[in-house]
Image (cartoon, rainbow, N blue to C red):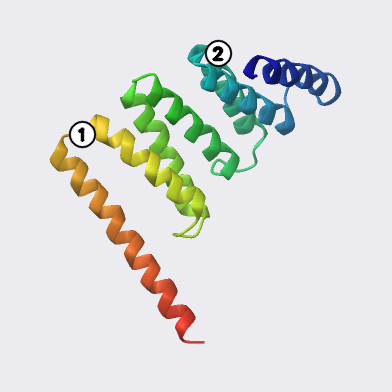
């Protein structure tokens, strides 16, 4: 099934590059999707190649350094490096993801929550148990505070 999907995505990538060029956000999106397929199939080096190409394109074509597309690329690279057991590299990418998404999204946004979830697992591999628990509780307290701020804001109306 993955092979057939990959075949269709490769064909779509070829057509997109022919019509839009090799430096286009839609082309970068296809590289992300192809990378995800390779990741699911366990071909991590191929996934890495496509993820990095998508990140490079998104950075080249972006007017701002911090946007959600770049954060998505960082997140995918973080997860991939986590699977490859290169935790220090994964940590640097997931931290970039969280920093961008914290600036651009509401505290209870699903993408941001997903970033915190991924960050928790990556940090678990990088830190001692004591540091890991304090890290987890820090975000738990922040999320509880955000919830109550949101709740009290809605209650006033």
From the viewer's perspective, is residue 11 above or below residue 60? above
Where, by quadrant of the figure, is residue 120 drawn? Answer: top left
> Where 154 sits versus 90, above or below?
below
Circle 2 is placed at which residue position? 46
- The quarter of the image holding the N terminus is top right
SS at mark 2?
A: helix
Looking at the image, which residue is at 65% across and 41% down? 63
Judged from this view, the residue extending furthest toward the right is 19
Q: Nearer the viewer, residue 61 or 99?
A: 99
Q: Position of residue 145 (x, y in %)?
A: 33, 67
Q: Residue at x 48, y 27 (%)?
A: 77
- Pointer 1: what residue? 127
Q: Relative to 140, does residue 44 appear above or below in the rendering?
A: above
Q: CA distance from mark 1 to mark 2?
A: 29 Å
Number of callouts: 2
Percent coordinates x, y for residue 117 in the rendering: 38, 44
The residue under the point 72% across, 15% down is 7
- Residue 150 is situated, as x and y percent measured from the top left of the image, at 44, 72
* SS of the residue under disc 1: loop
Query: Of label 1 and label 2, which has the lower sequence position?
Result: 2
Residue sitting at the far bottom = 157
Give the percent coordinates (x, y) of residue 33: 63, 27
Q: Residues within 10 Å of mark 1 (few under 14, many from 20)?
A: few
108 left or right, relative to 24: left
């Amino acid at each position: 099934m993955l092979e057939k999907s990959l075949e269709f995505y490769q064909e779509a990538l070829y057509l997109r590059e022919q019509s839009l060029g090799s430096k286009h956000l839609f082309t970068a999106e296809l590289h992300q999707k192809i990378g995800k397929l390779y990741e699911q199939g366990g071909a991590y080096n191929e996934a890495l190649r496509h993820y990095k190409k998508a990140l490079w394109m998104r950075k080249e074509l972006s007017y701002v350094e911090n946007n959600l597309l770049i954060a998505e690329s960082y997140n995918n690279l973080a997860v991939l490096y986590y699977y490859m057991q290169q935790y220090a590299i994964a940590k640097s990418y997931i931290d970039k993801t969280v920093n961008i998404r914290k600036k651009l999204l509401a505290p209870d946004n699903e993408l941001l929550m997903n970033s915190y979830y991924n960050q928790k697992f990556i940090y678990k591999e990088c830190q001692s148990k004591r540091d890991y628990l304090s890290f987890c509780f820090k975000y738990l307290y922040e999320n509880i505070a955000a919830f109550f701020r949101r709740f009290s804001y809605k209650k006033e109306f």
